[in-house]
Every structure is written in C-alpha cells, then in structure tokens.
Amino acid sequence: MCGICGIFHRSGRPVVEPILRRMIDVLEHRGPDDFGVWYEGQVGLGHRRLAIRDLSPAGHQPQCDPSGQIVVSYNGEIYNDREVRAALARDFGLTFRSTCDTEIIPVGYLAWGEEFFHRLEGMFAIALWDRAEKKLVLARDGVGIKPIFYSADQDVVRFASEIKALLADPHQSQRLSSEGVHRFLARGYCGPTSTTLEGIRQVPPGTVMTFTSHRETSRRFWQPKRQPDIRSVDEAVDGFLALWPQVVRDQLVSDVPVGILQSGGIDSTLVSLAANDSSRSPTPLFTAQFADKSFDEVPLAASVAKHLGAPFHPISVAAPGGLAEVLRRVVKIYDGQVADEASIPLFLLSAAVRQHVKVALSGDGGDEFFGGYQTYAASPAAAVLGHLLPRAVWQAFGRASYARAGSDETRLPLLAKVTRLALGIADGGAKHAHAYWRRLVPAFLLNDLYGPELRPLVDLDPFEEYRGILASEAGTLVDRCLVADQRFHLPGGLLLKSDAMSMAHGLEIRVPLLDRRVMEFAGRIDARLLLGRTGDSKRVLRAAARRLGAPEAVVSAGKRGFNTPLARLLRVDLRPLAEDCFDKAADRLTPWLEPNTVRRLWREHRDAVVNHDYALWPILNLSLWLDETGGKRGQAAVPPRAIAVANNAFTGDGAGALQTGAGHVSGNR
C-alpha cells in the first residue's frame, strides 16, 4: 500500500522536478518506508512506499520492466500475483528477481496490454508510462477500493492518490466546484468519479484510462452486476464456504504483522473465523471501544476472540486532546471530499492499530453485497406505500416529522426513520426512494440555505447518477438497490473513507468481502435469500457464520454500524467548534451558503428545538475545509512547501531497476 502521483505535459514541456517532489512529499503518510521519483522529458512519476511484501530494495518504485519500456508507480495489493507470474513464465519465458507484486505489472502490461488489468485480483491504483508509445495509463480496481484523482486538460495531466498532492502543484486550479459542493452537502461525498474541486475527477472503478498528447480514452474492464441463479440458502452457504477460506488466506499474505478490525457484526466475524483456523498462528483482533454502551461492541467482539483463542485488543476511541482537533485533522486528510461522522472513530482506531500491526483485514462490503442495510427491506415497502399518497403529501409529512425531532439523541430515533422514509418517497418517488434516504441536507432547506454560488442549483438533483443506476438496471427492486450501492455509494463514500482514515497512519486495510471472486458469487444469489420475509438481513452470511461455529449472540445480533451519536456530539463534545463555525465564523461560508441561515439552523439544533445534526455535519466539514485551505470564495489554496531531498541516482540491474539515462530516480531505500 502506497501513495502515487505524476505529471504528463501533453504539450511536450519538460516536467519540473521540484514540483514532482512537492507532490510526493505531501503523501509521506501513505508510504513512510521509502520514496522515489522518476522523470524523463514531459513525464514524471512519484511514489511513496509502505513496505508490506518483499521488504528489500527490490520493491522500490517507480519500477520498470527489464527492457525499460514500461515505468510503473502502483498502490495496492495483487493477491493472485503468483498465478500471474506462473502464466508469464510459462507463456513468455519470463523470470523474476523478487517476490514483490509490483514486478508483474510492467511485464504483464507488455504481455497482455489493457486486458492485463482484468486478470488482476486485488485492490489497486496503477499508473504506468509507456516510453515507446508515449502514453500514460491509469487503472483502478473493479469496485474502487483504491482511489486515483486526476486533472486533465489539453496541456497537462496530473494524478495522485490524494487531492492534496495535485494541489501541491501551484499550476493546478484550486477553485471549488459549485456542483461538487451541491452534491457534497446532499450526500456527504461527491460520488465515485467526481470531486468538490473544479477540473479534478476520479478514475472510475474498474476502469483503465489512457492519455496521449492528443487523445484520452476510457474503458471499463469490470463492474459489479447481479445475475441470480442460486435459489436455495444451503446452495448459497455451501458455495460461499467453499470460496471463503481461500480468499482470506490469500489476503493474509504479508511480510509484516497482520490484524483484524473486529466489530460485533457478522462480516468481520467471518474474516476472523477464516483467519484463525488451526493451520496458522492466531491473528489478533482489534475493536473500537465507545464510552456510550449503546454504541459499544466490545462484549460481542470479545466473545469472538475468546471462541477463537485469538489475542484481543479493545481500543478506546476517545480523543484525549479533544474531538475538535481530531475532526480538523480528519477534514484535512479528506481534502474536502467526505463528511462521515464514522470517520472520527475509524481515524482513532487506525492510529492505535498501527502501533501493533501494519496490515488489517476488515469486513467492509458485506452490507452492499449480502443485503445488510434496512433500506433493502424498506425499498419494496416504499414502492407500495408511495402510491397511496401524492408526493406532495409525503413531503409535507416528512417536513412535519423533521420539525418535531428536537432533543432525541438515541442511536436511531424512530422519528428520524419516519422522516427519512417520507422525504425519500417525496424526493425519489415510490420506485427510487432508496437513492434519497441517505440525504444529509434536506431539499426543503436549500432555498433559504444556499447563497449566490449555489442558488442556481437548488433544482438540480444531486442524486441523479445514483438514481440513474436504480432506473437502468434489470431485476427486482432489491437487485437494483444492491447494484446501485455497489457501484455508487460504496466507492463514492465508504471506501474513500476507509482508504483515507487508515492510510493517514500508514495502515493498510484489506477487504476480503470485496474480493472479485466473492463479489461475483454474491451477484449470483437470489435477493430473496439475502433478506428474510421479516426483514432479517444477511441471511447467507449469518448461516455461514453459524455453520463455522460463531457465537450465537453475534450471529443473531442486529446491525449497529460504526457511526457516532451525532446530535449530542455537536451539542456537547464539539460545541465550541460548532459555535465558531456556525455562528462567529459563518461568513466564511459566503458565497456558497447564507450565513444567517446557517446561524439559525445551528441555534435551533443547539437549543434542541429541531435536530439538524445531519444537515449541519457536511456544513461543518465544508467550513473547516475552507478554513484549512484559507479558501475565500472557493479559492482553496494549498501553499507549496519547498522540499530538500537528496537527488541521488538509482541504478541497478535486472527487472525493476531503472538504468541511468532512462530517467532519474531518487529515494531513501
């Protein structure tokens, strides 16, 4: 796991090495073990290494094939690299000098071209430069576990693992995008392809993009889909258990210590059960410990550890220095791209886990592929209820219930659920309510809330892409909801959160349930097997866990999630920060939002008149991002820092070594 960046001057202008070094310097947290830069004429690649497999200098990047034609900078893990090596050796007579998975990438691309990316099983963000064809290739794994941000115009292409690296180039436009901010306020993220900054986008999941001096192409090589042909629970469980142990075994491969992020839920329990079989040493379990017992899952997680005889580490996610400072750090790491209250505990947990291990497996993806959200049961109900009343009535009902939710600070207040049901039907109609139930700032607040920059967008649907997947896919409504979450919600927000919060501490998180073999298998399971008639979720995974001997308390427990008590968080723990951002410094949000409306919403929430917690949360994150960047009227600027780095030439022989004359590479191997 690493950080990558690069510049390609399509006009032929030479790359300026100090700019490339500034870009890679701001990614140091992603790869504290090593760094390298390679540049030649109009192109330059940078790399920050988090050494996980083959800790020797053979894993140094940027790296090239023996001929020197393909230069690569890569972030991720390839789990089937041994199979790919064997195929390359068999079919092309290639030999390898390391056990690092990076080594297969340049030769694999030479052997198979863009078809190579479809052969890879893993999580990856790959950038390679073809010196013969003079083209830049960017590829992202199928479900979007690893990000690549890029900007491209007729003169220059820039790319990086994080936006802050793009902004380290003083020539990069740094103005906020009105449409991006509009989507961010509605969803807490922009989506799997867009951002909050003008001209900066993301390589779509499962896509390879190619840039030459005069052309840009994009081709999708994989995406989740549902083609159900498994019609019985026993068949589904048998198939899953035949696949699962090998998937987890593949993802335990590491030359550094590995742990598991264990919640009290089914997904991480299945990971722990497969990782801690009798054939290997116990893998330690790490669990977030909340002071609020209604959020705490330590007892359930402890029962899993006891059952397995595995080391168990409950980790308090309290912030001794105060949550305000933690939130500021979180916002800075995100570069203004995500507003998710669960980021705070994940940030704190990742920091603590990194003191013990360098790699951790998690249960991410189980909800989206095996039916874990309550919305999958609610969507068919909404499709029926939505036709009983006009949408205007649902809107009025939703607004009335929203206004009544004042002081309830329980985990999931009933009135909040009713509000989301009604407003989702009002915004999306009976068939598409699912896309709108995660809305943060309600649509009915926008006329008063939006300032001059955003007011023209009041009627622009920020969920159009999400809704579009729901409308275009085949299958039952639940099938379409699953696919929409897999292609949009999962990579757009959740996976970006997991990557940013873990890599802020140099911790690699692996996600076995998002192994392509598992995702494709899940797509074959009839949706009726995933959800019971009474609304019980993840039936197949629960049955699999029960068959593997998981504690019954875990198997039968309902979903809790990793969120925090947001209403109380704003009123108590973050109150001084909220007072500053929403009241004293509300003018900072001009011209995007109306400061006086922000002040009113905050005071209503503070005084428990109306619960505006989810509406205020993205506004707070936006305010902190503008404050962090010094961005007035959207001119978000990150001042470049001068970096003094030794410019030592890296030379060597064999695969992966860049010869003198092929470019320049420096690093502290």
Image (cartoon, rainbow, N blue to C red):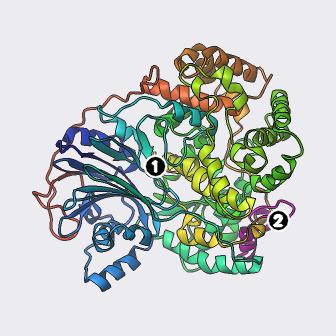
| Residue visible at 86% across and 52% down in the picture | 384
First along the sequence among labels 1 and 2: 1
Amino acid on which disc 2 is placed: Gly
548 part of magenta stretch: yes
Per the image, the residue denoted by label 1 is 503
191 lies left or right of 81:
right
Q: Amino acid at mark 1?
A: Met
Foreground of the two, 561 or 71: 71
Instruction: Please identify the quarter of the rendering in which residue 423 is found.
Output: top right
Residue at position x 15%, y 68% in the image: 653
| Range shown magenta | 531-554
Q: Residues within 10 Å of mark 2 (few under 14, many from 20)?
A: few
- Toward the viewer: 306 or 238? 238
The residue at the far right in this view is: 388
Neighbor class of circle 1 (other Cα within 10 Å; few <14, some 14-19, many 20+) is: many
Q: Secondary structure at mark 1?
A: helix
**Is 567 contained in the magenta span?**
no
Quadrant in the picture for the N terminus: bottom left
Residue 532's disc number: 2
How far across and how far down the image is residue 47, in percent?
A: 30, 52
Q: How many numbered discs? A: 2
What residue lies at 17% left-to-right and 42% top-to-bottom? 13
574 up-or-down from 525: above or below: above
Q: Is residue 352 visible?
A: no
Res. 187 in view: yes
10 left or right, relative to 299: left
Gap between marks 1 and 2 measured at Cα: 37 Å
Residue at x 59%, y 40% (from the top left corner) = 344
Q: Is residue 395 positioned above or below 452 on the image?
A: below
